[in-house]
Amino acid sequence: MKCYLCSGEMKKEMVTITRYRKGNYYLIEDVPAMVCEQCGEKWFSMSAVMKMDQLMEKPLEPGEKYINVPVRKFASG
């Protein structure tokens, strides 16, 4: 499979992705993806996207956790 951005080779990897939904950020680990070896672009199957959507809709399960992350504005000056 070739990358649609740079035509580099894509390889299958498990990645961590950050998603934003309804005012919340989600860090989802071990997501199967095709990743370009040249530019790093990630491609997800429809089933992976649907599973991520389902994970963001349900409550936390045992072993999952919330993390606190500082949020800062980038201001010139």
Image (cartoon, helix red, strand yellow):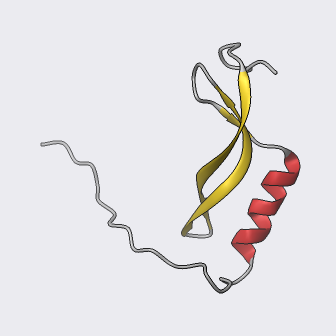
Residue in the picture at 65% in, 14% down: 6
- Up the image or down, 13 lies above or below 49; here it is above
- Viewed as shown, does residue 72 lie left or right of 11? left
Image x and y of residue 35, in percent: 67, 32
Residue in the picture at 39% in, 74% down: 68
Residue farthest to the right, as pictured:
47
- Viewed as shown, does residue 37 lie left or right of 3? left
- Viewed as shown, does residue 54 lie left or right of 59? right
Residue in the picture at 81% in, 53% down: 48
- Up the image or down, 63 lies above or below 16; here it is below
Residue farthest to the top, as pictured:
7
Image x and y of residue 60, in percent: 65, 83
The image quadrant of residue 41 is top right
Q: Nearer the viewer, residue 16 or 52?
A: 16
Image x and y of residue 25, in percent: 54, 65
Which quarter shows the C terminus? top left
- Viewed as shown, does residue 51 lie left or right of 15? right
Which quarter shows the N terminus? top right
Image x and y of residue 12, in percent: 74, 36
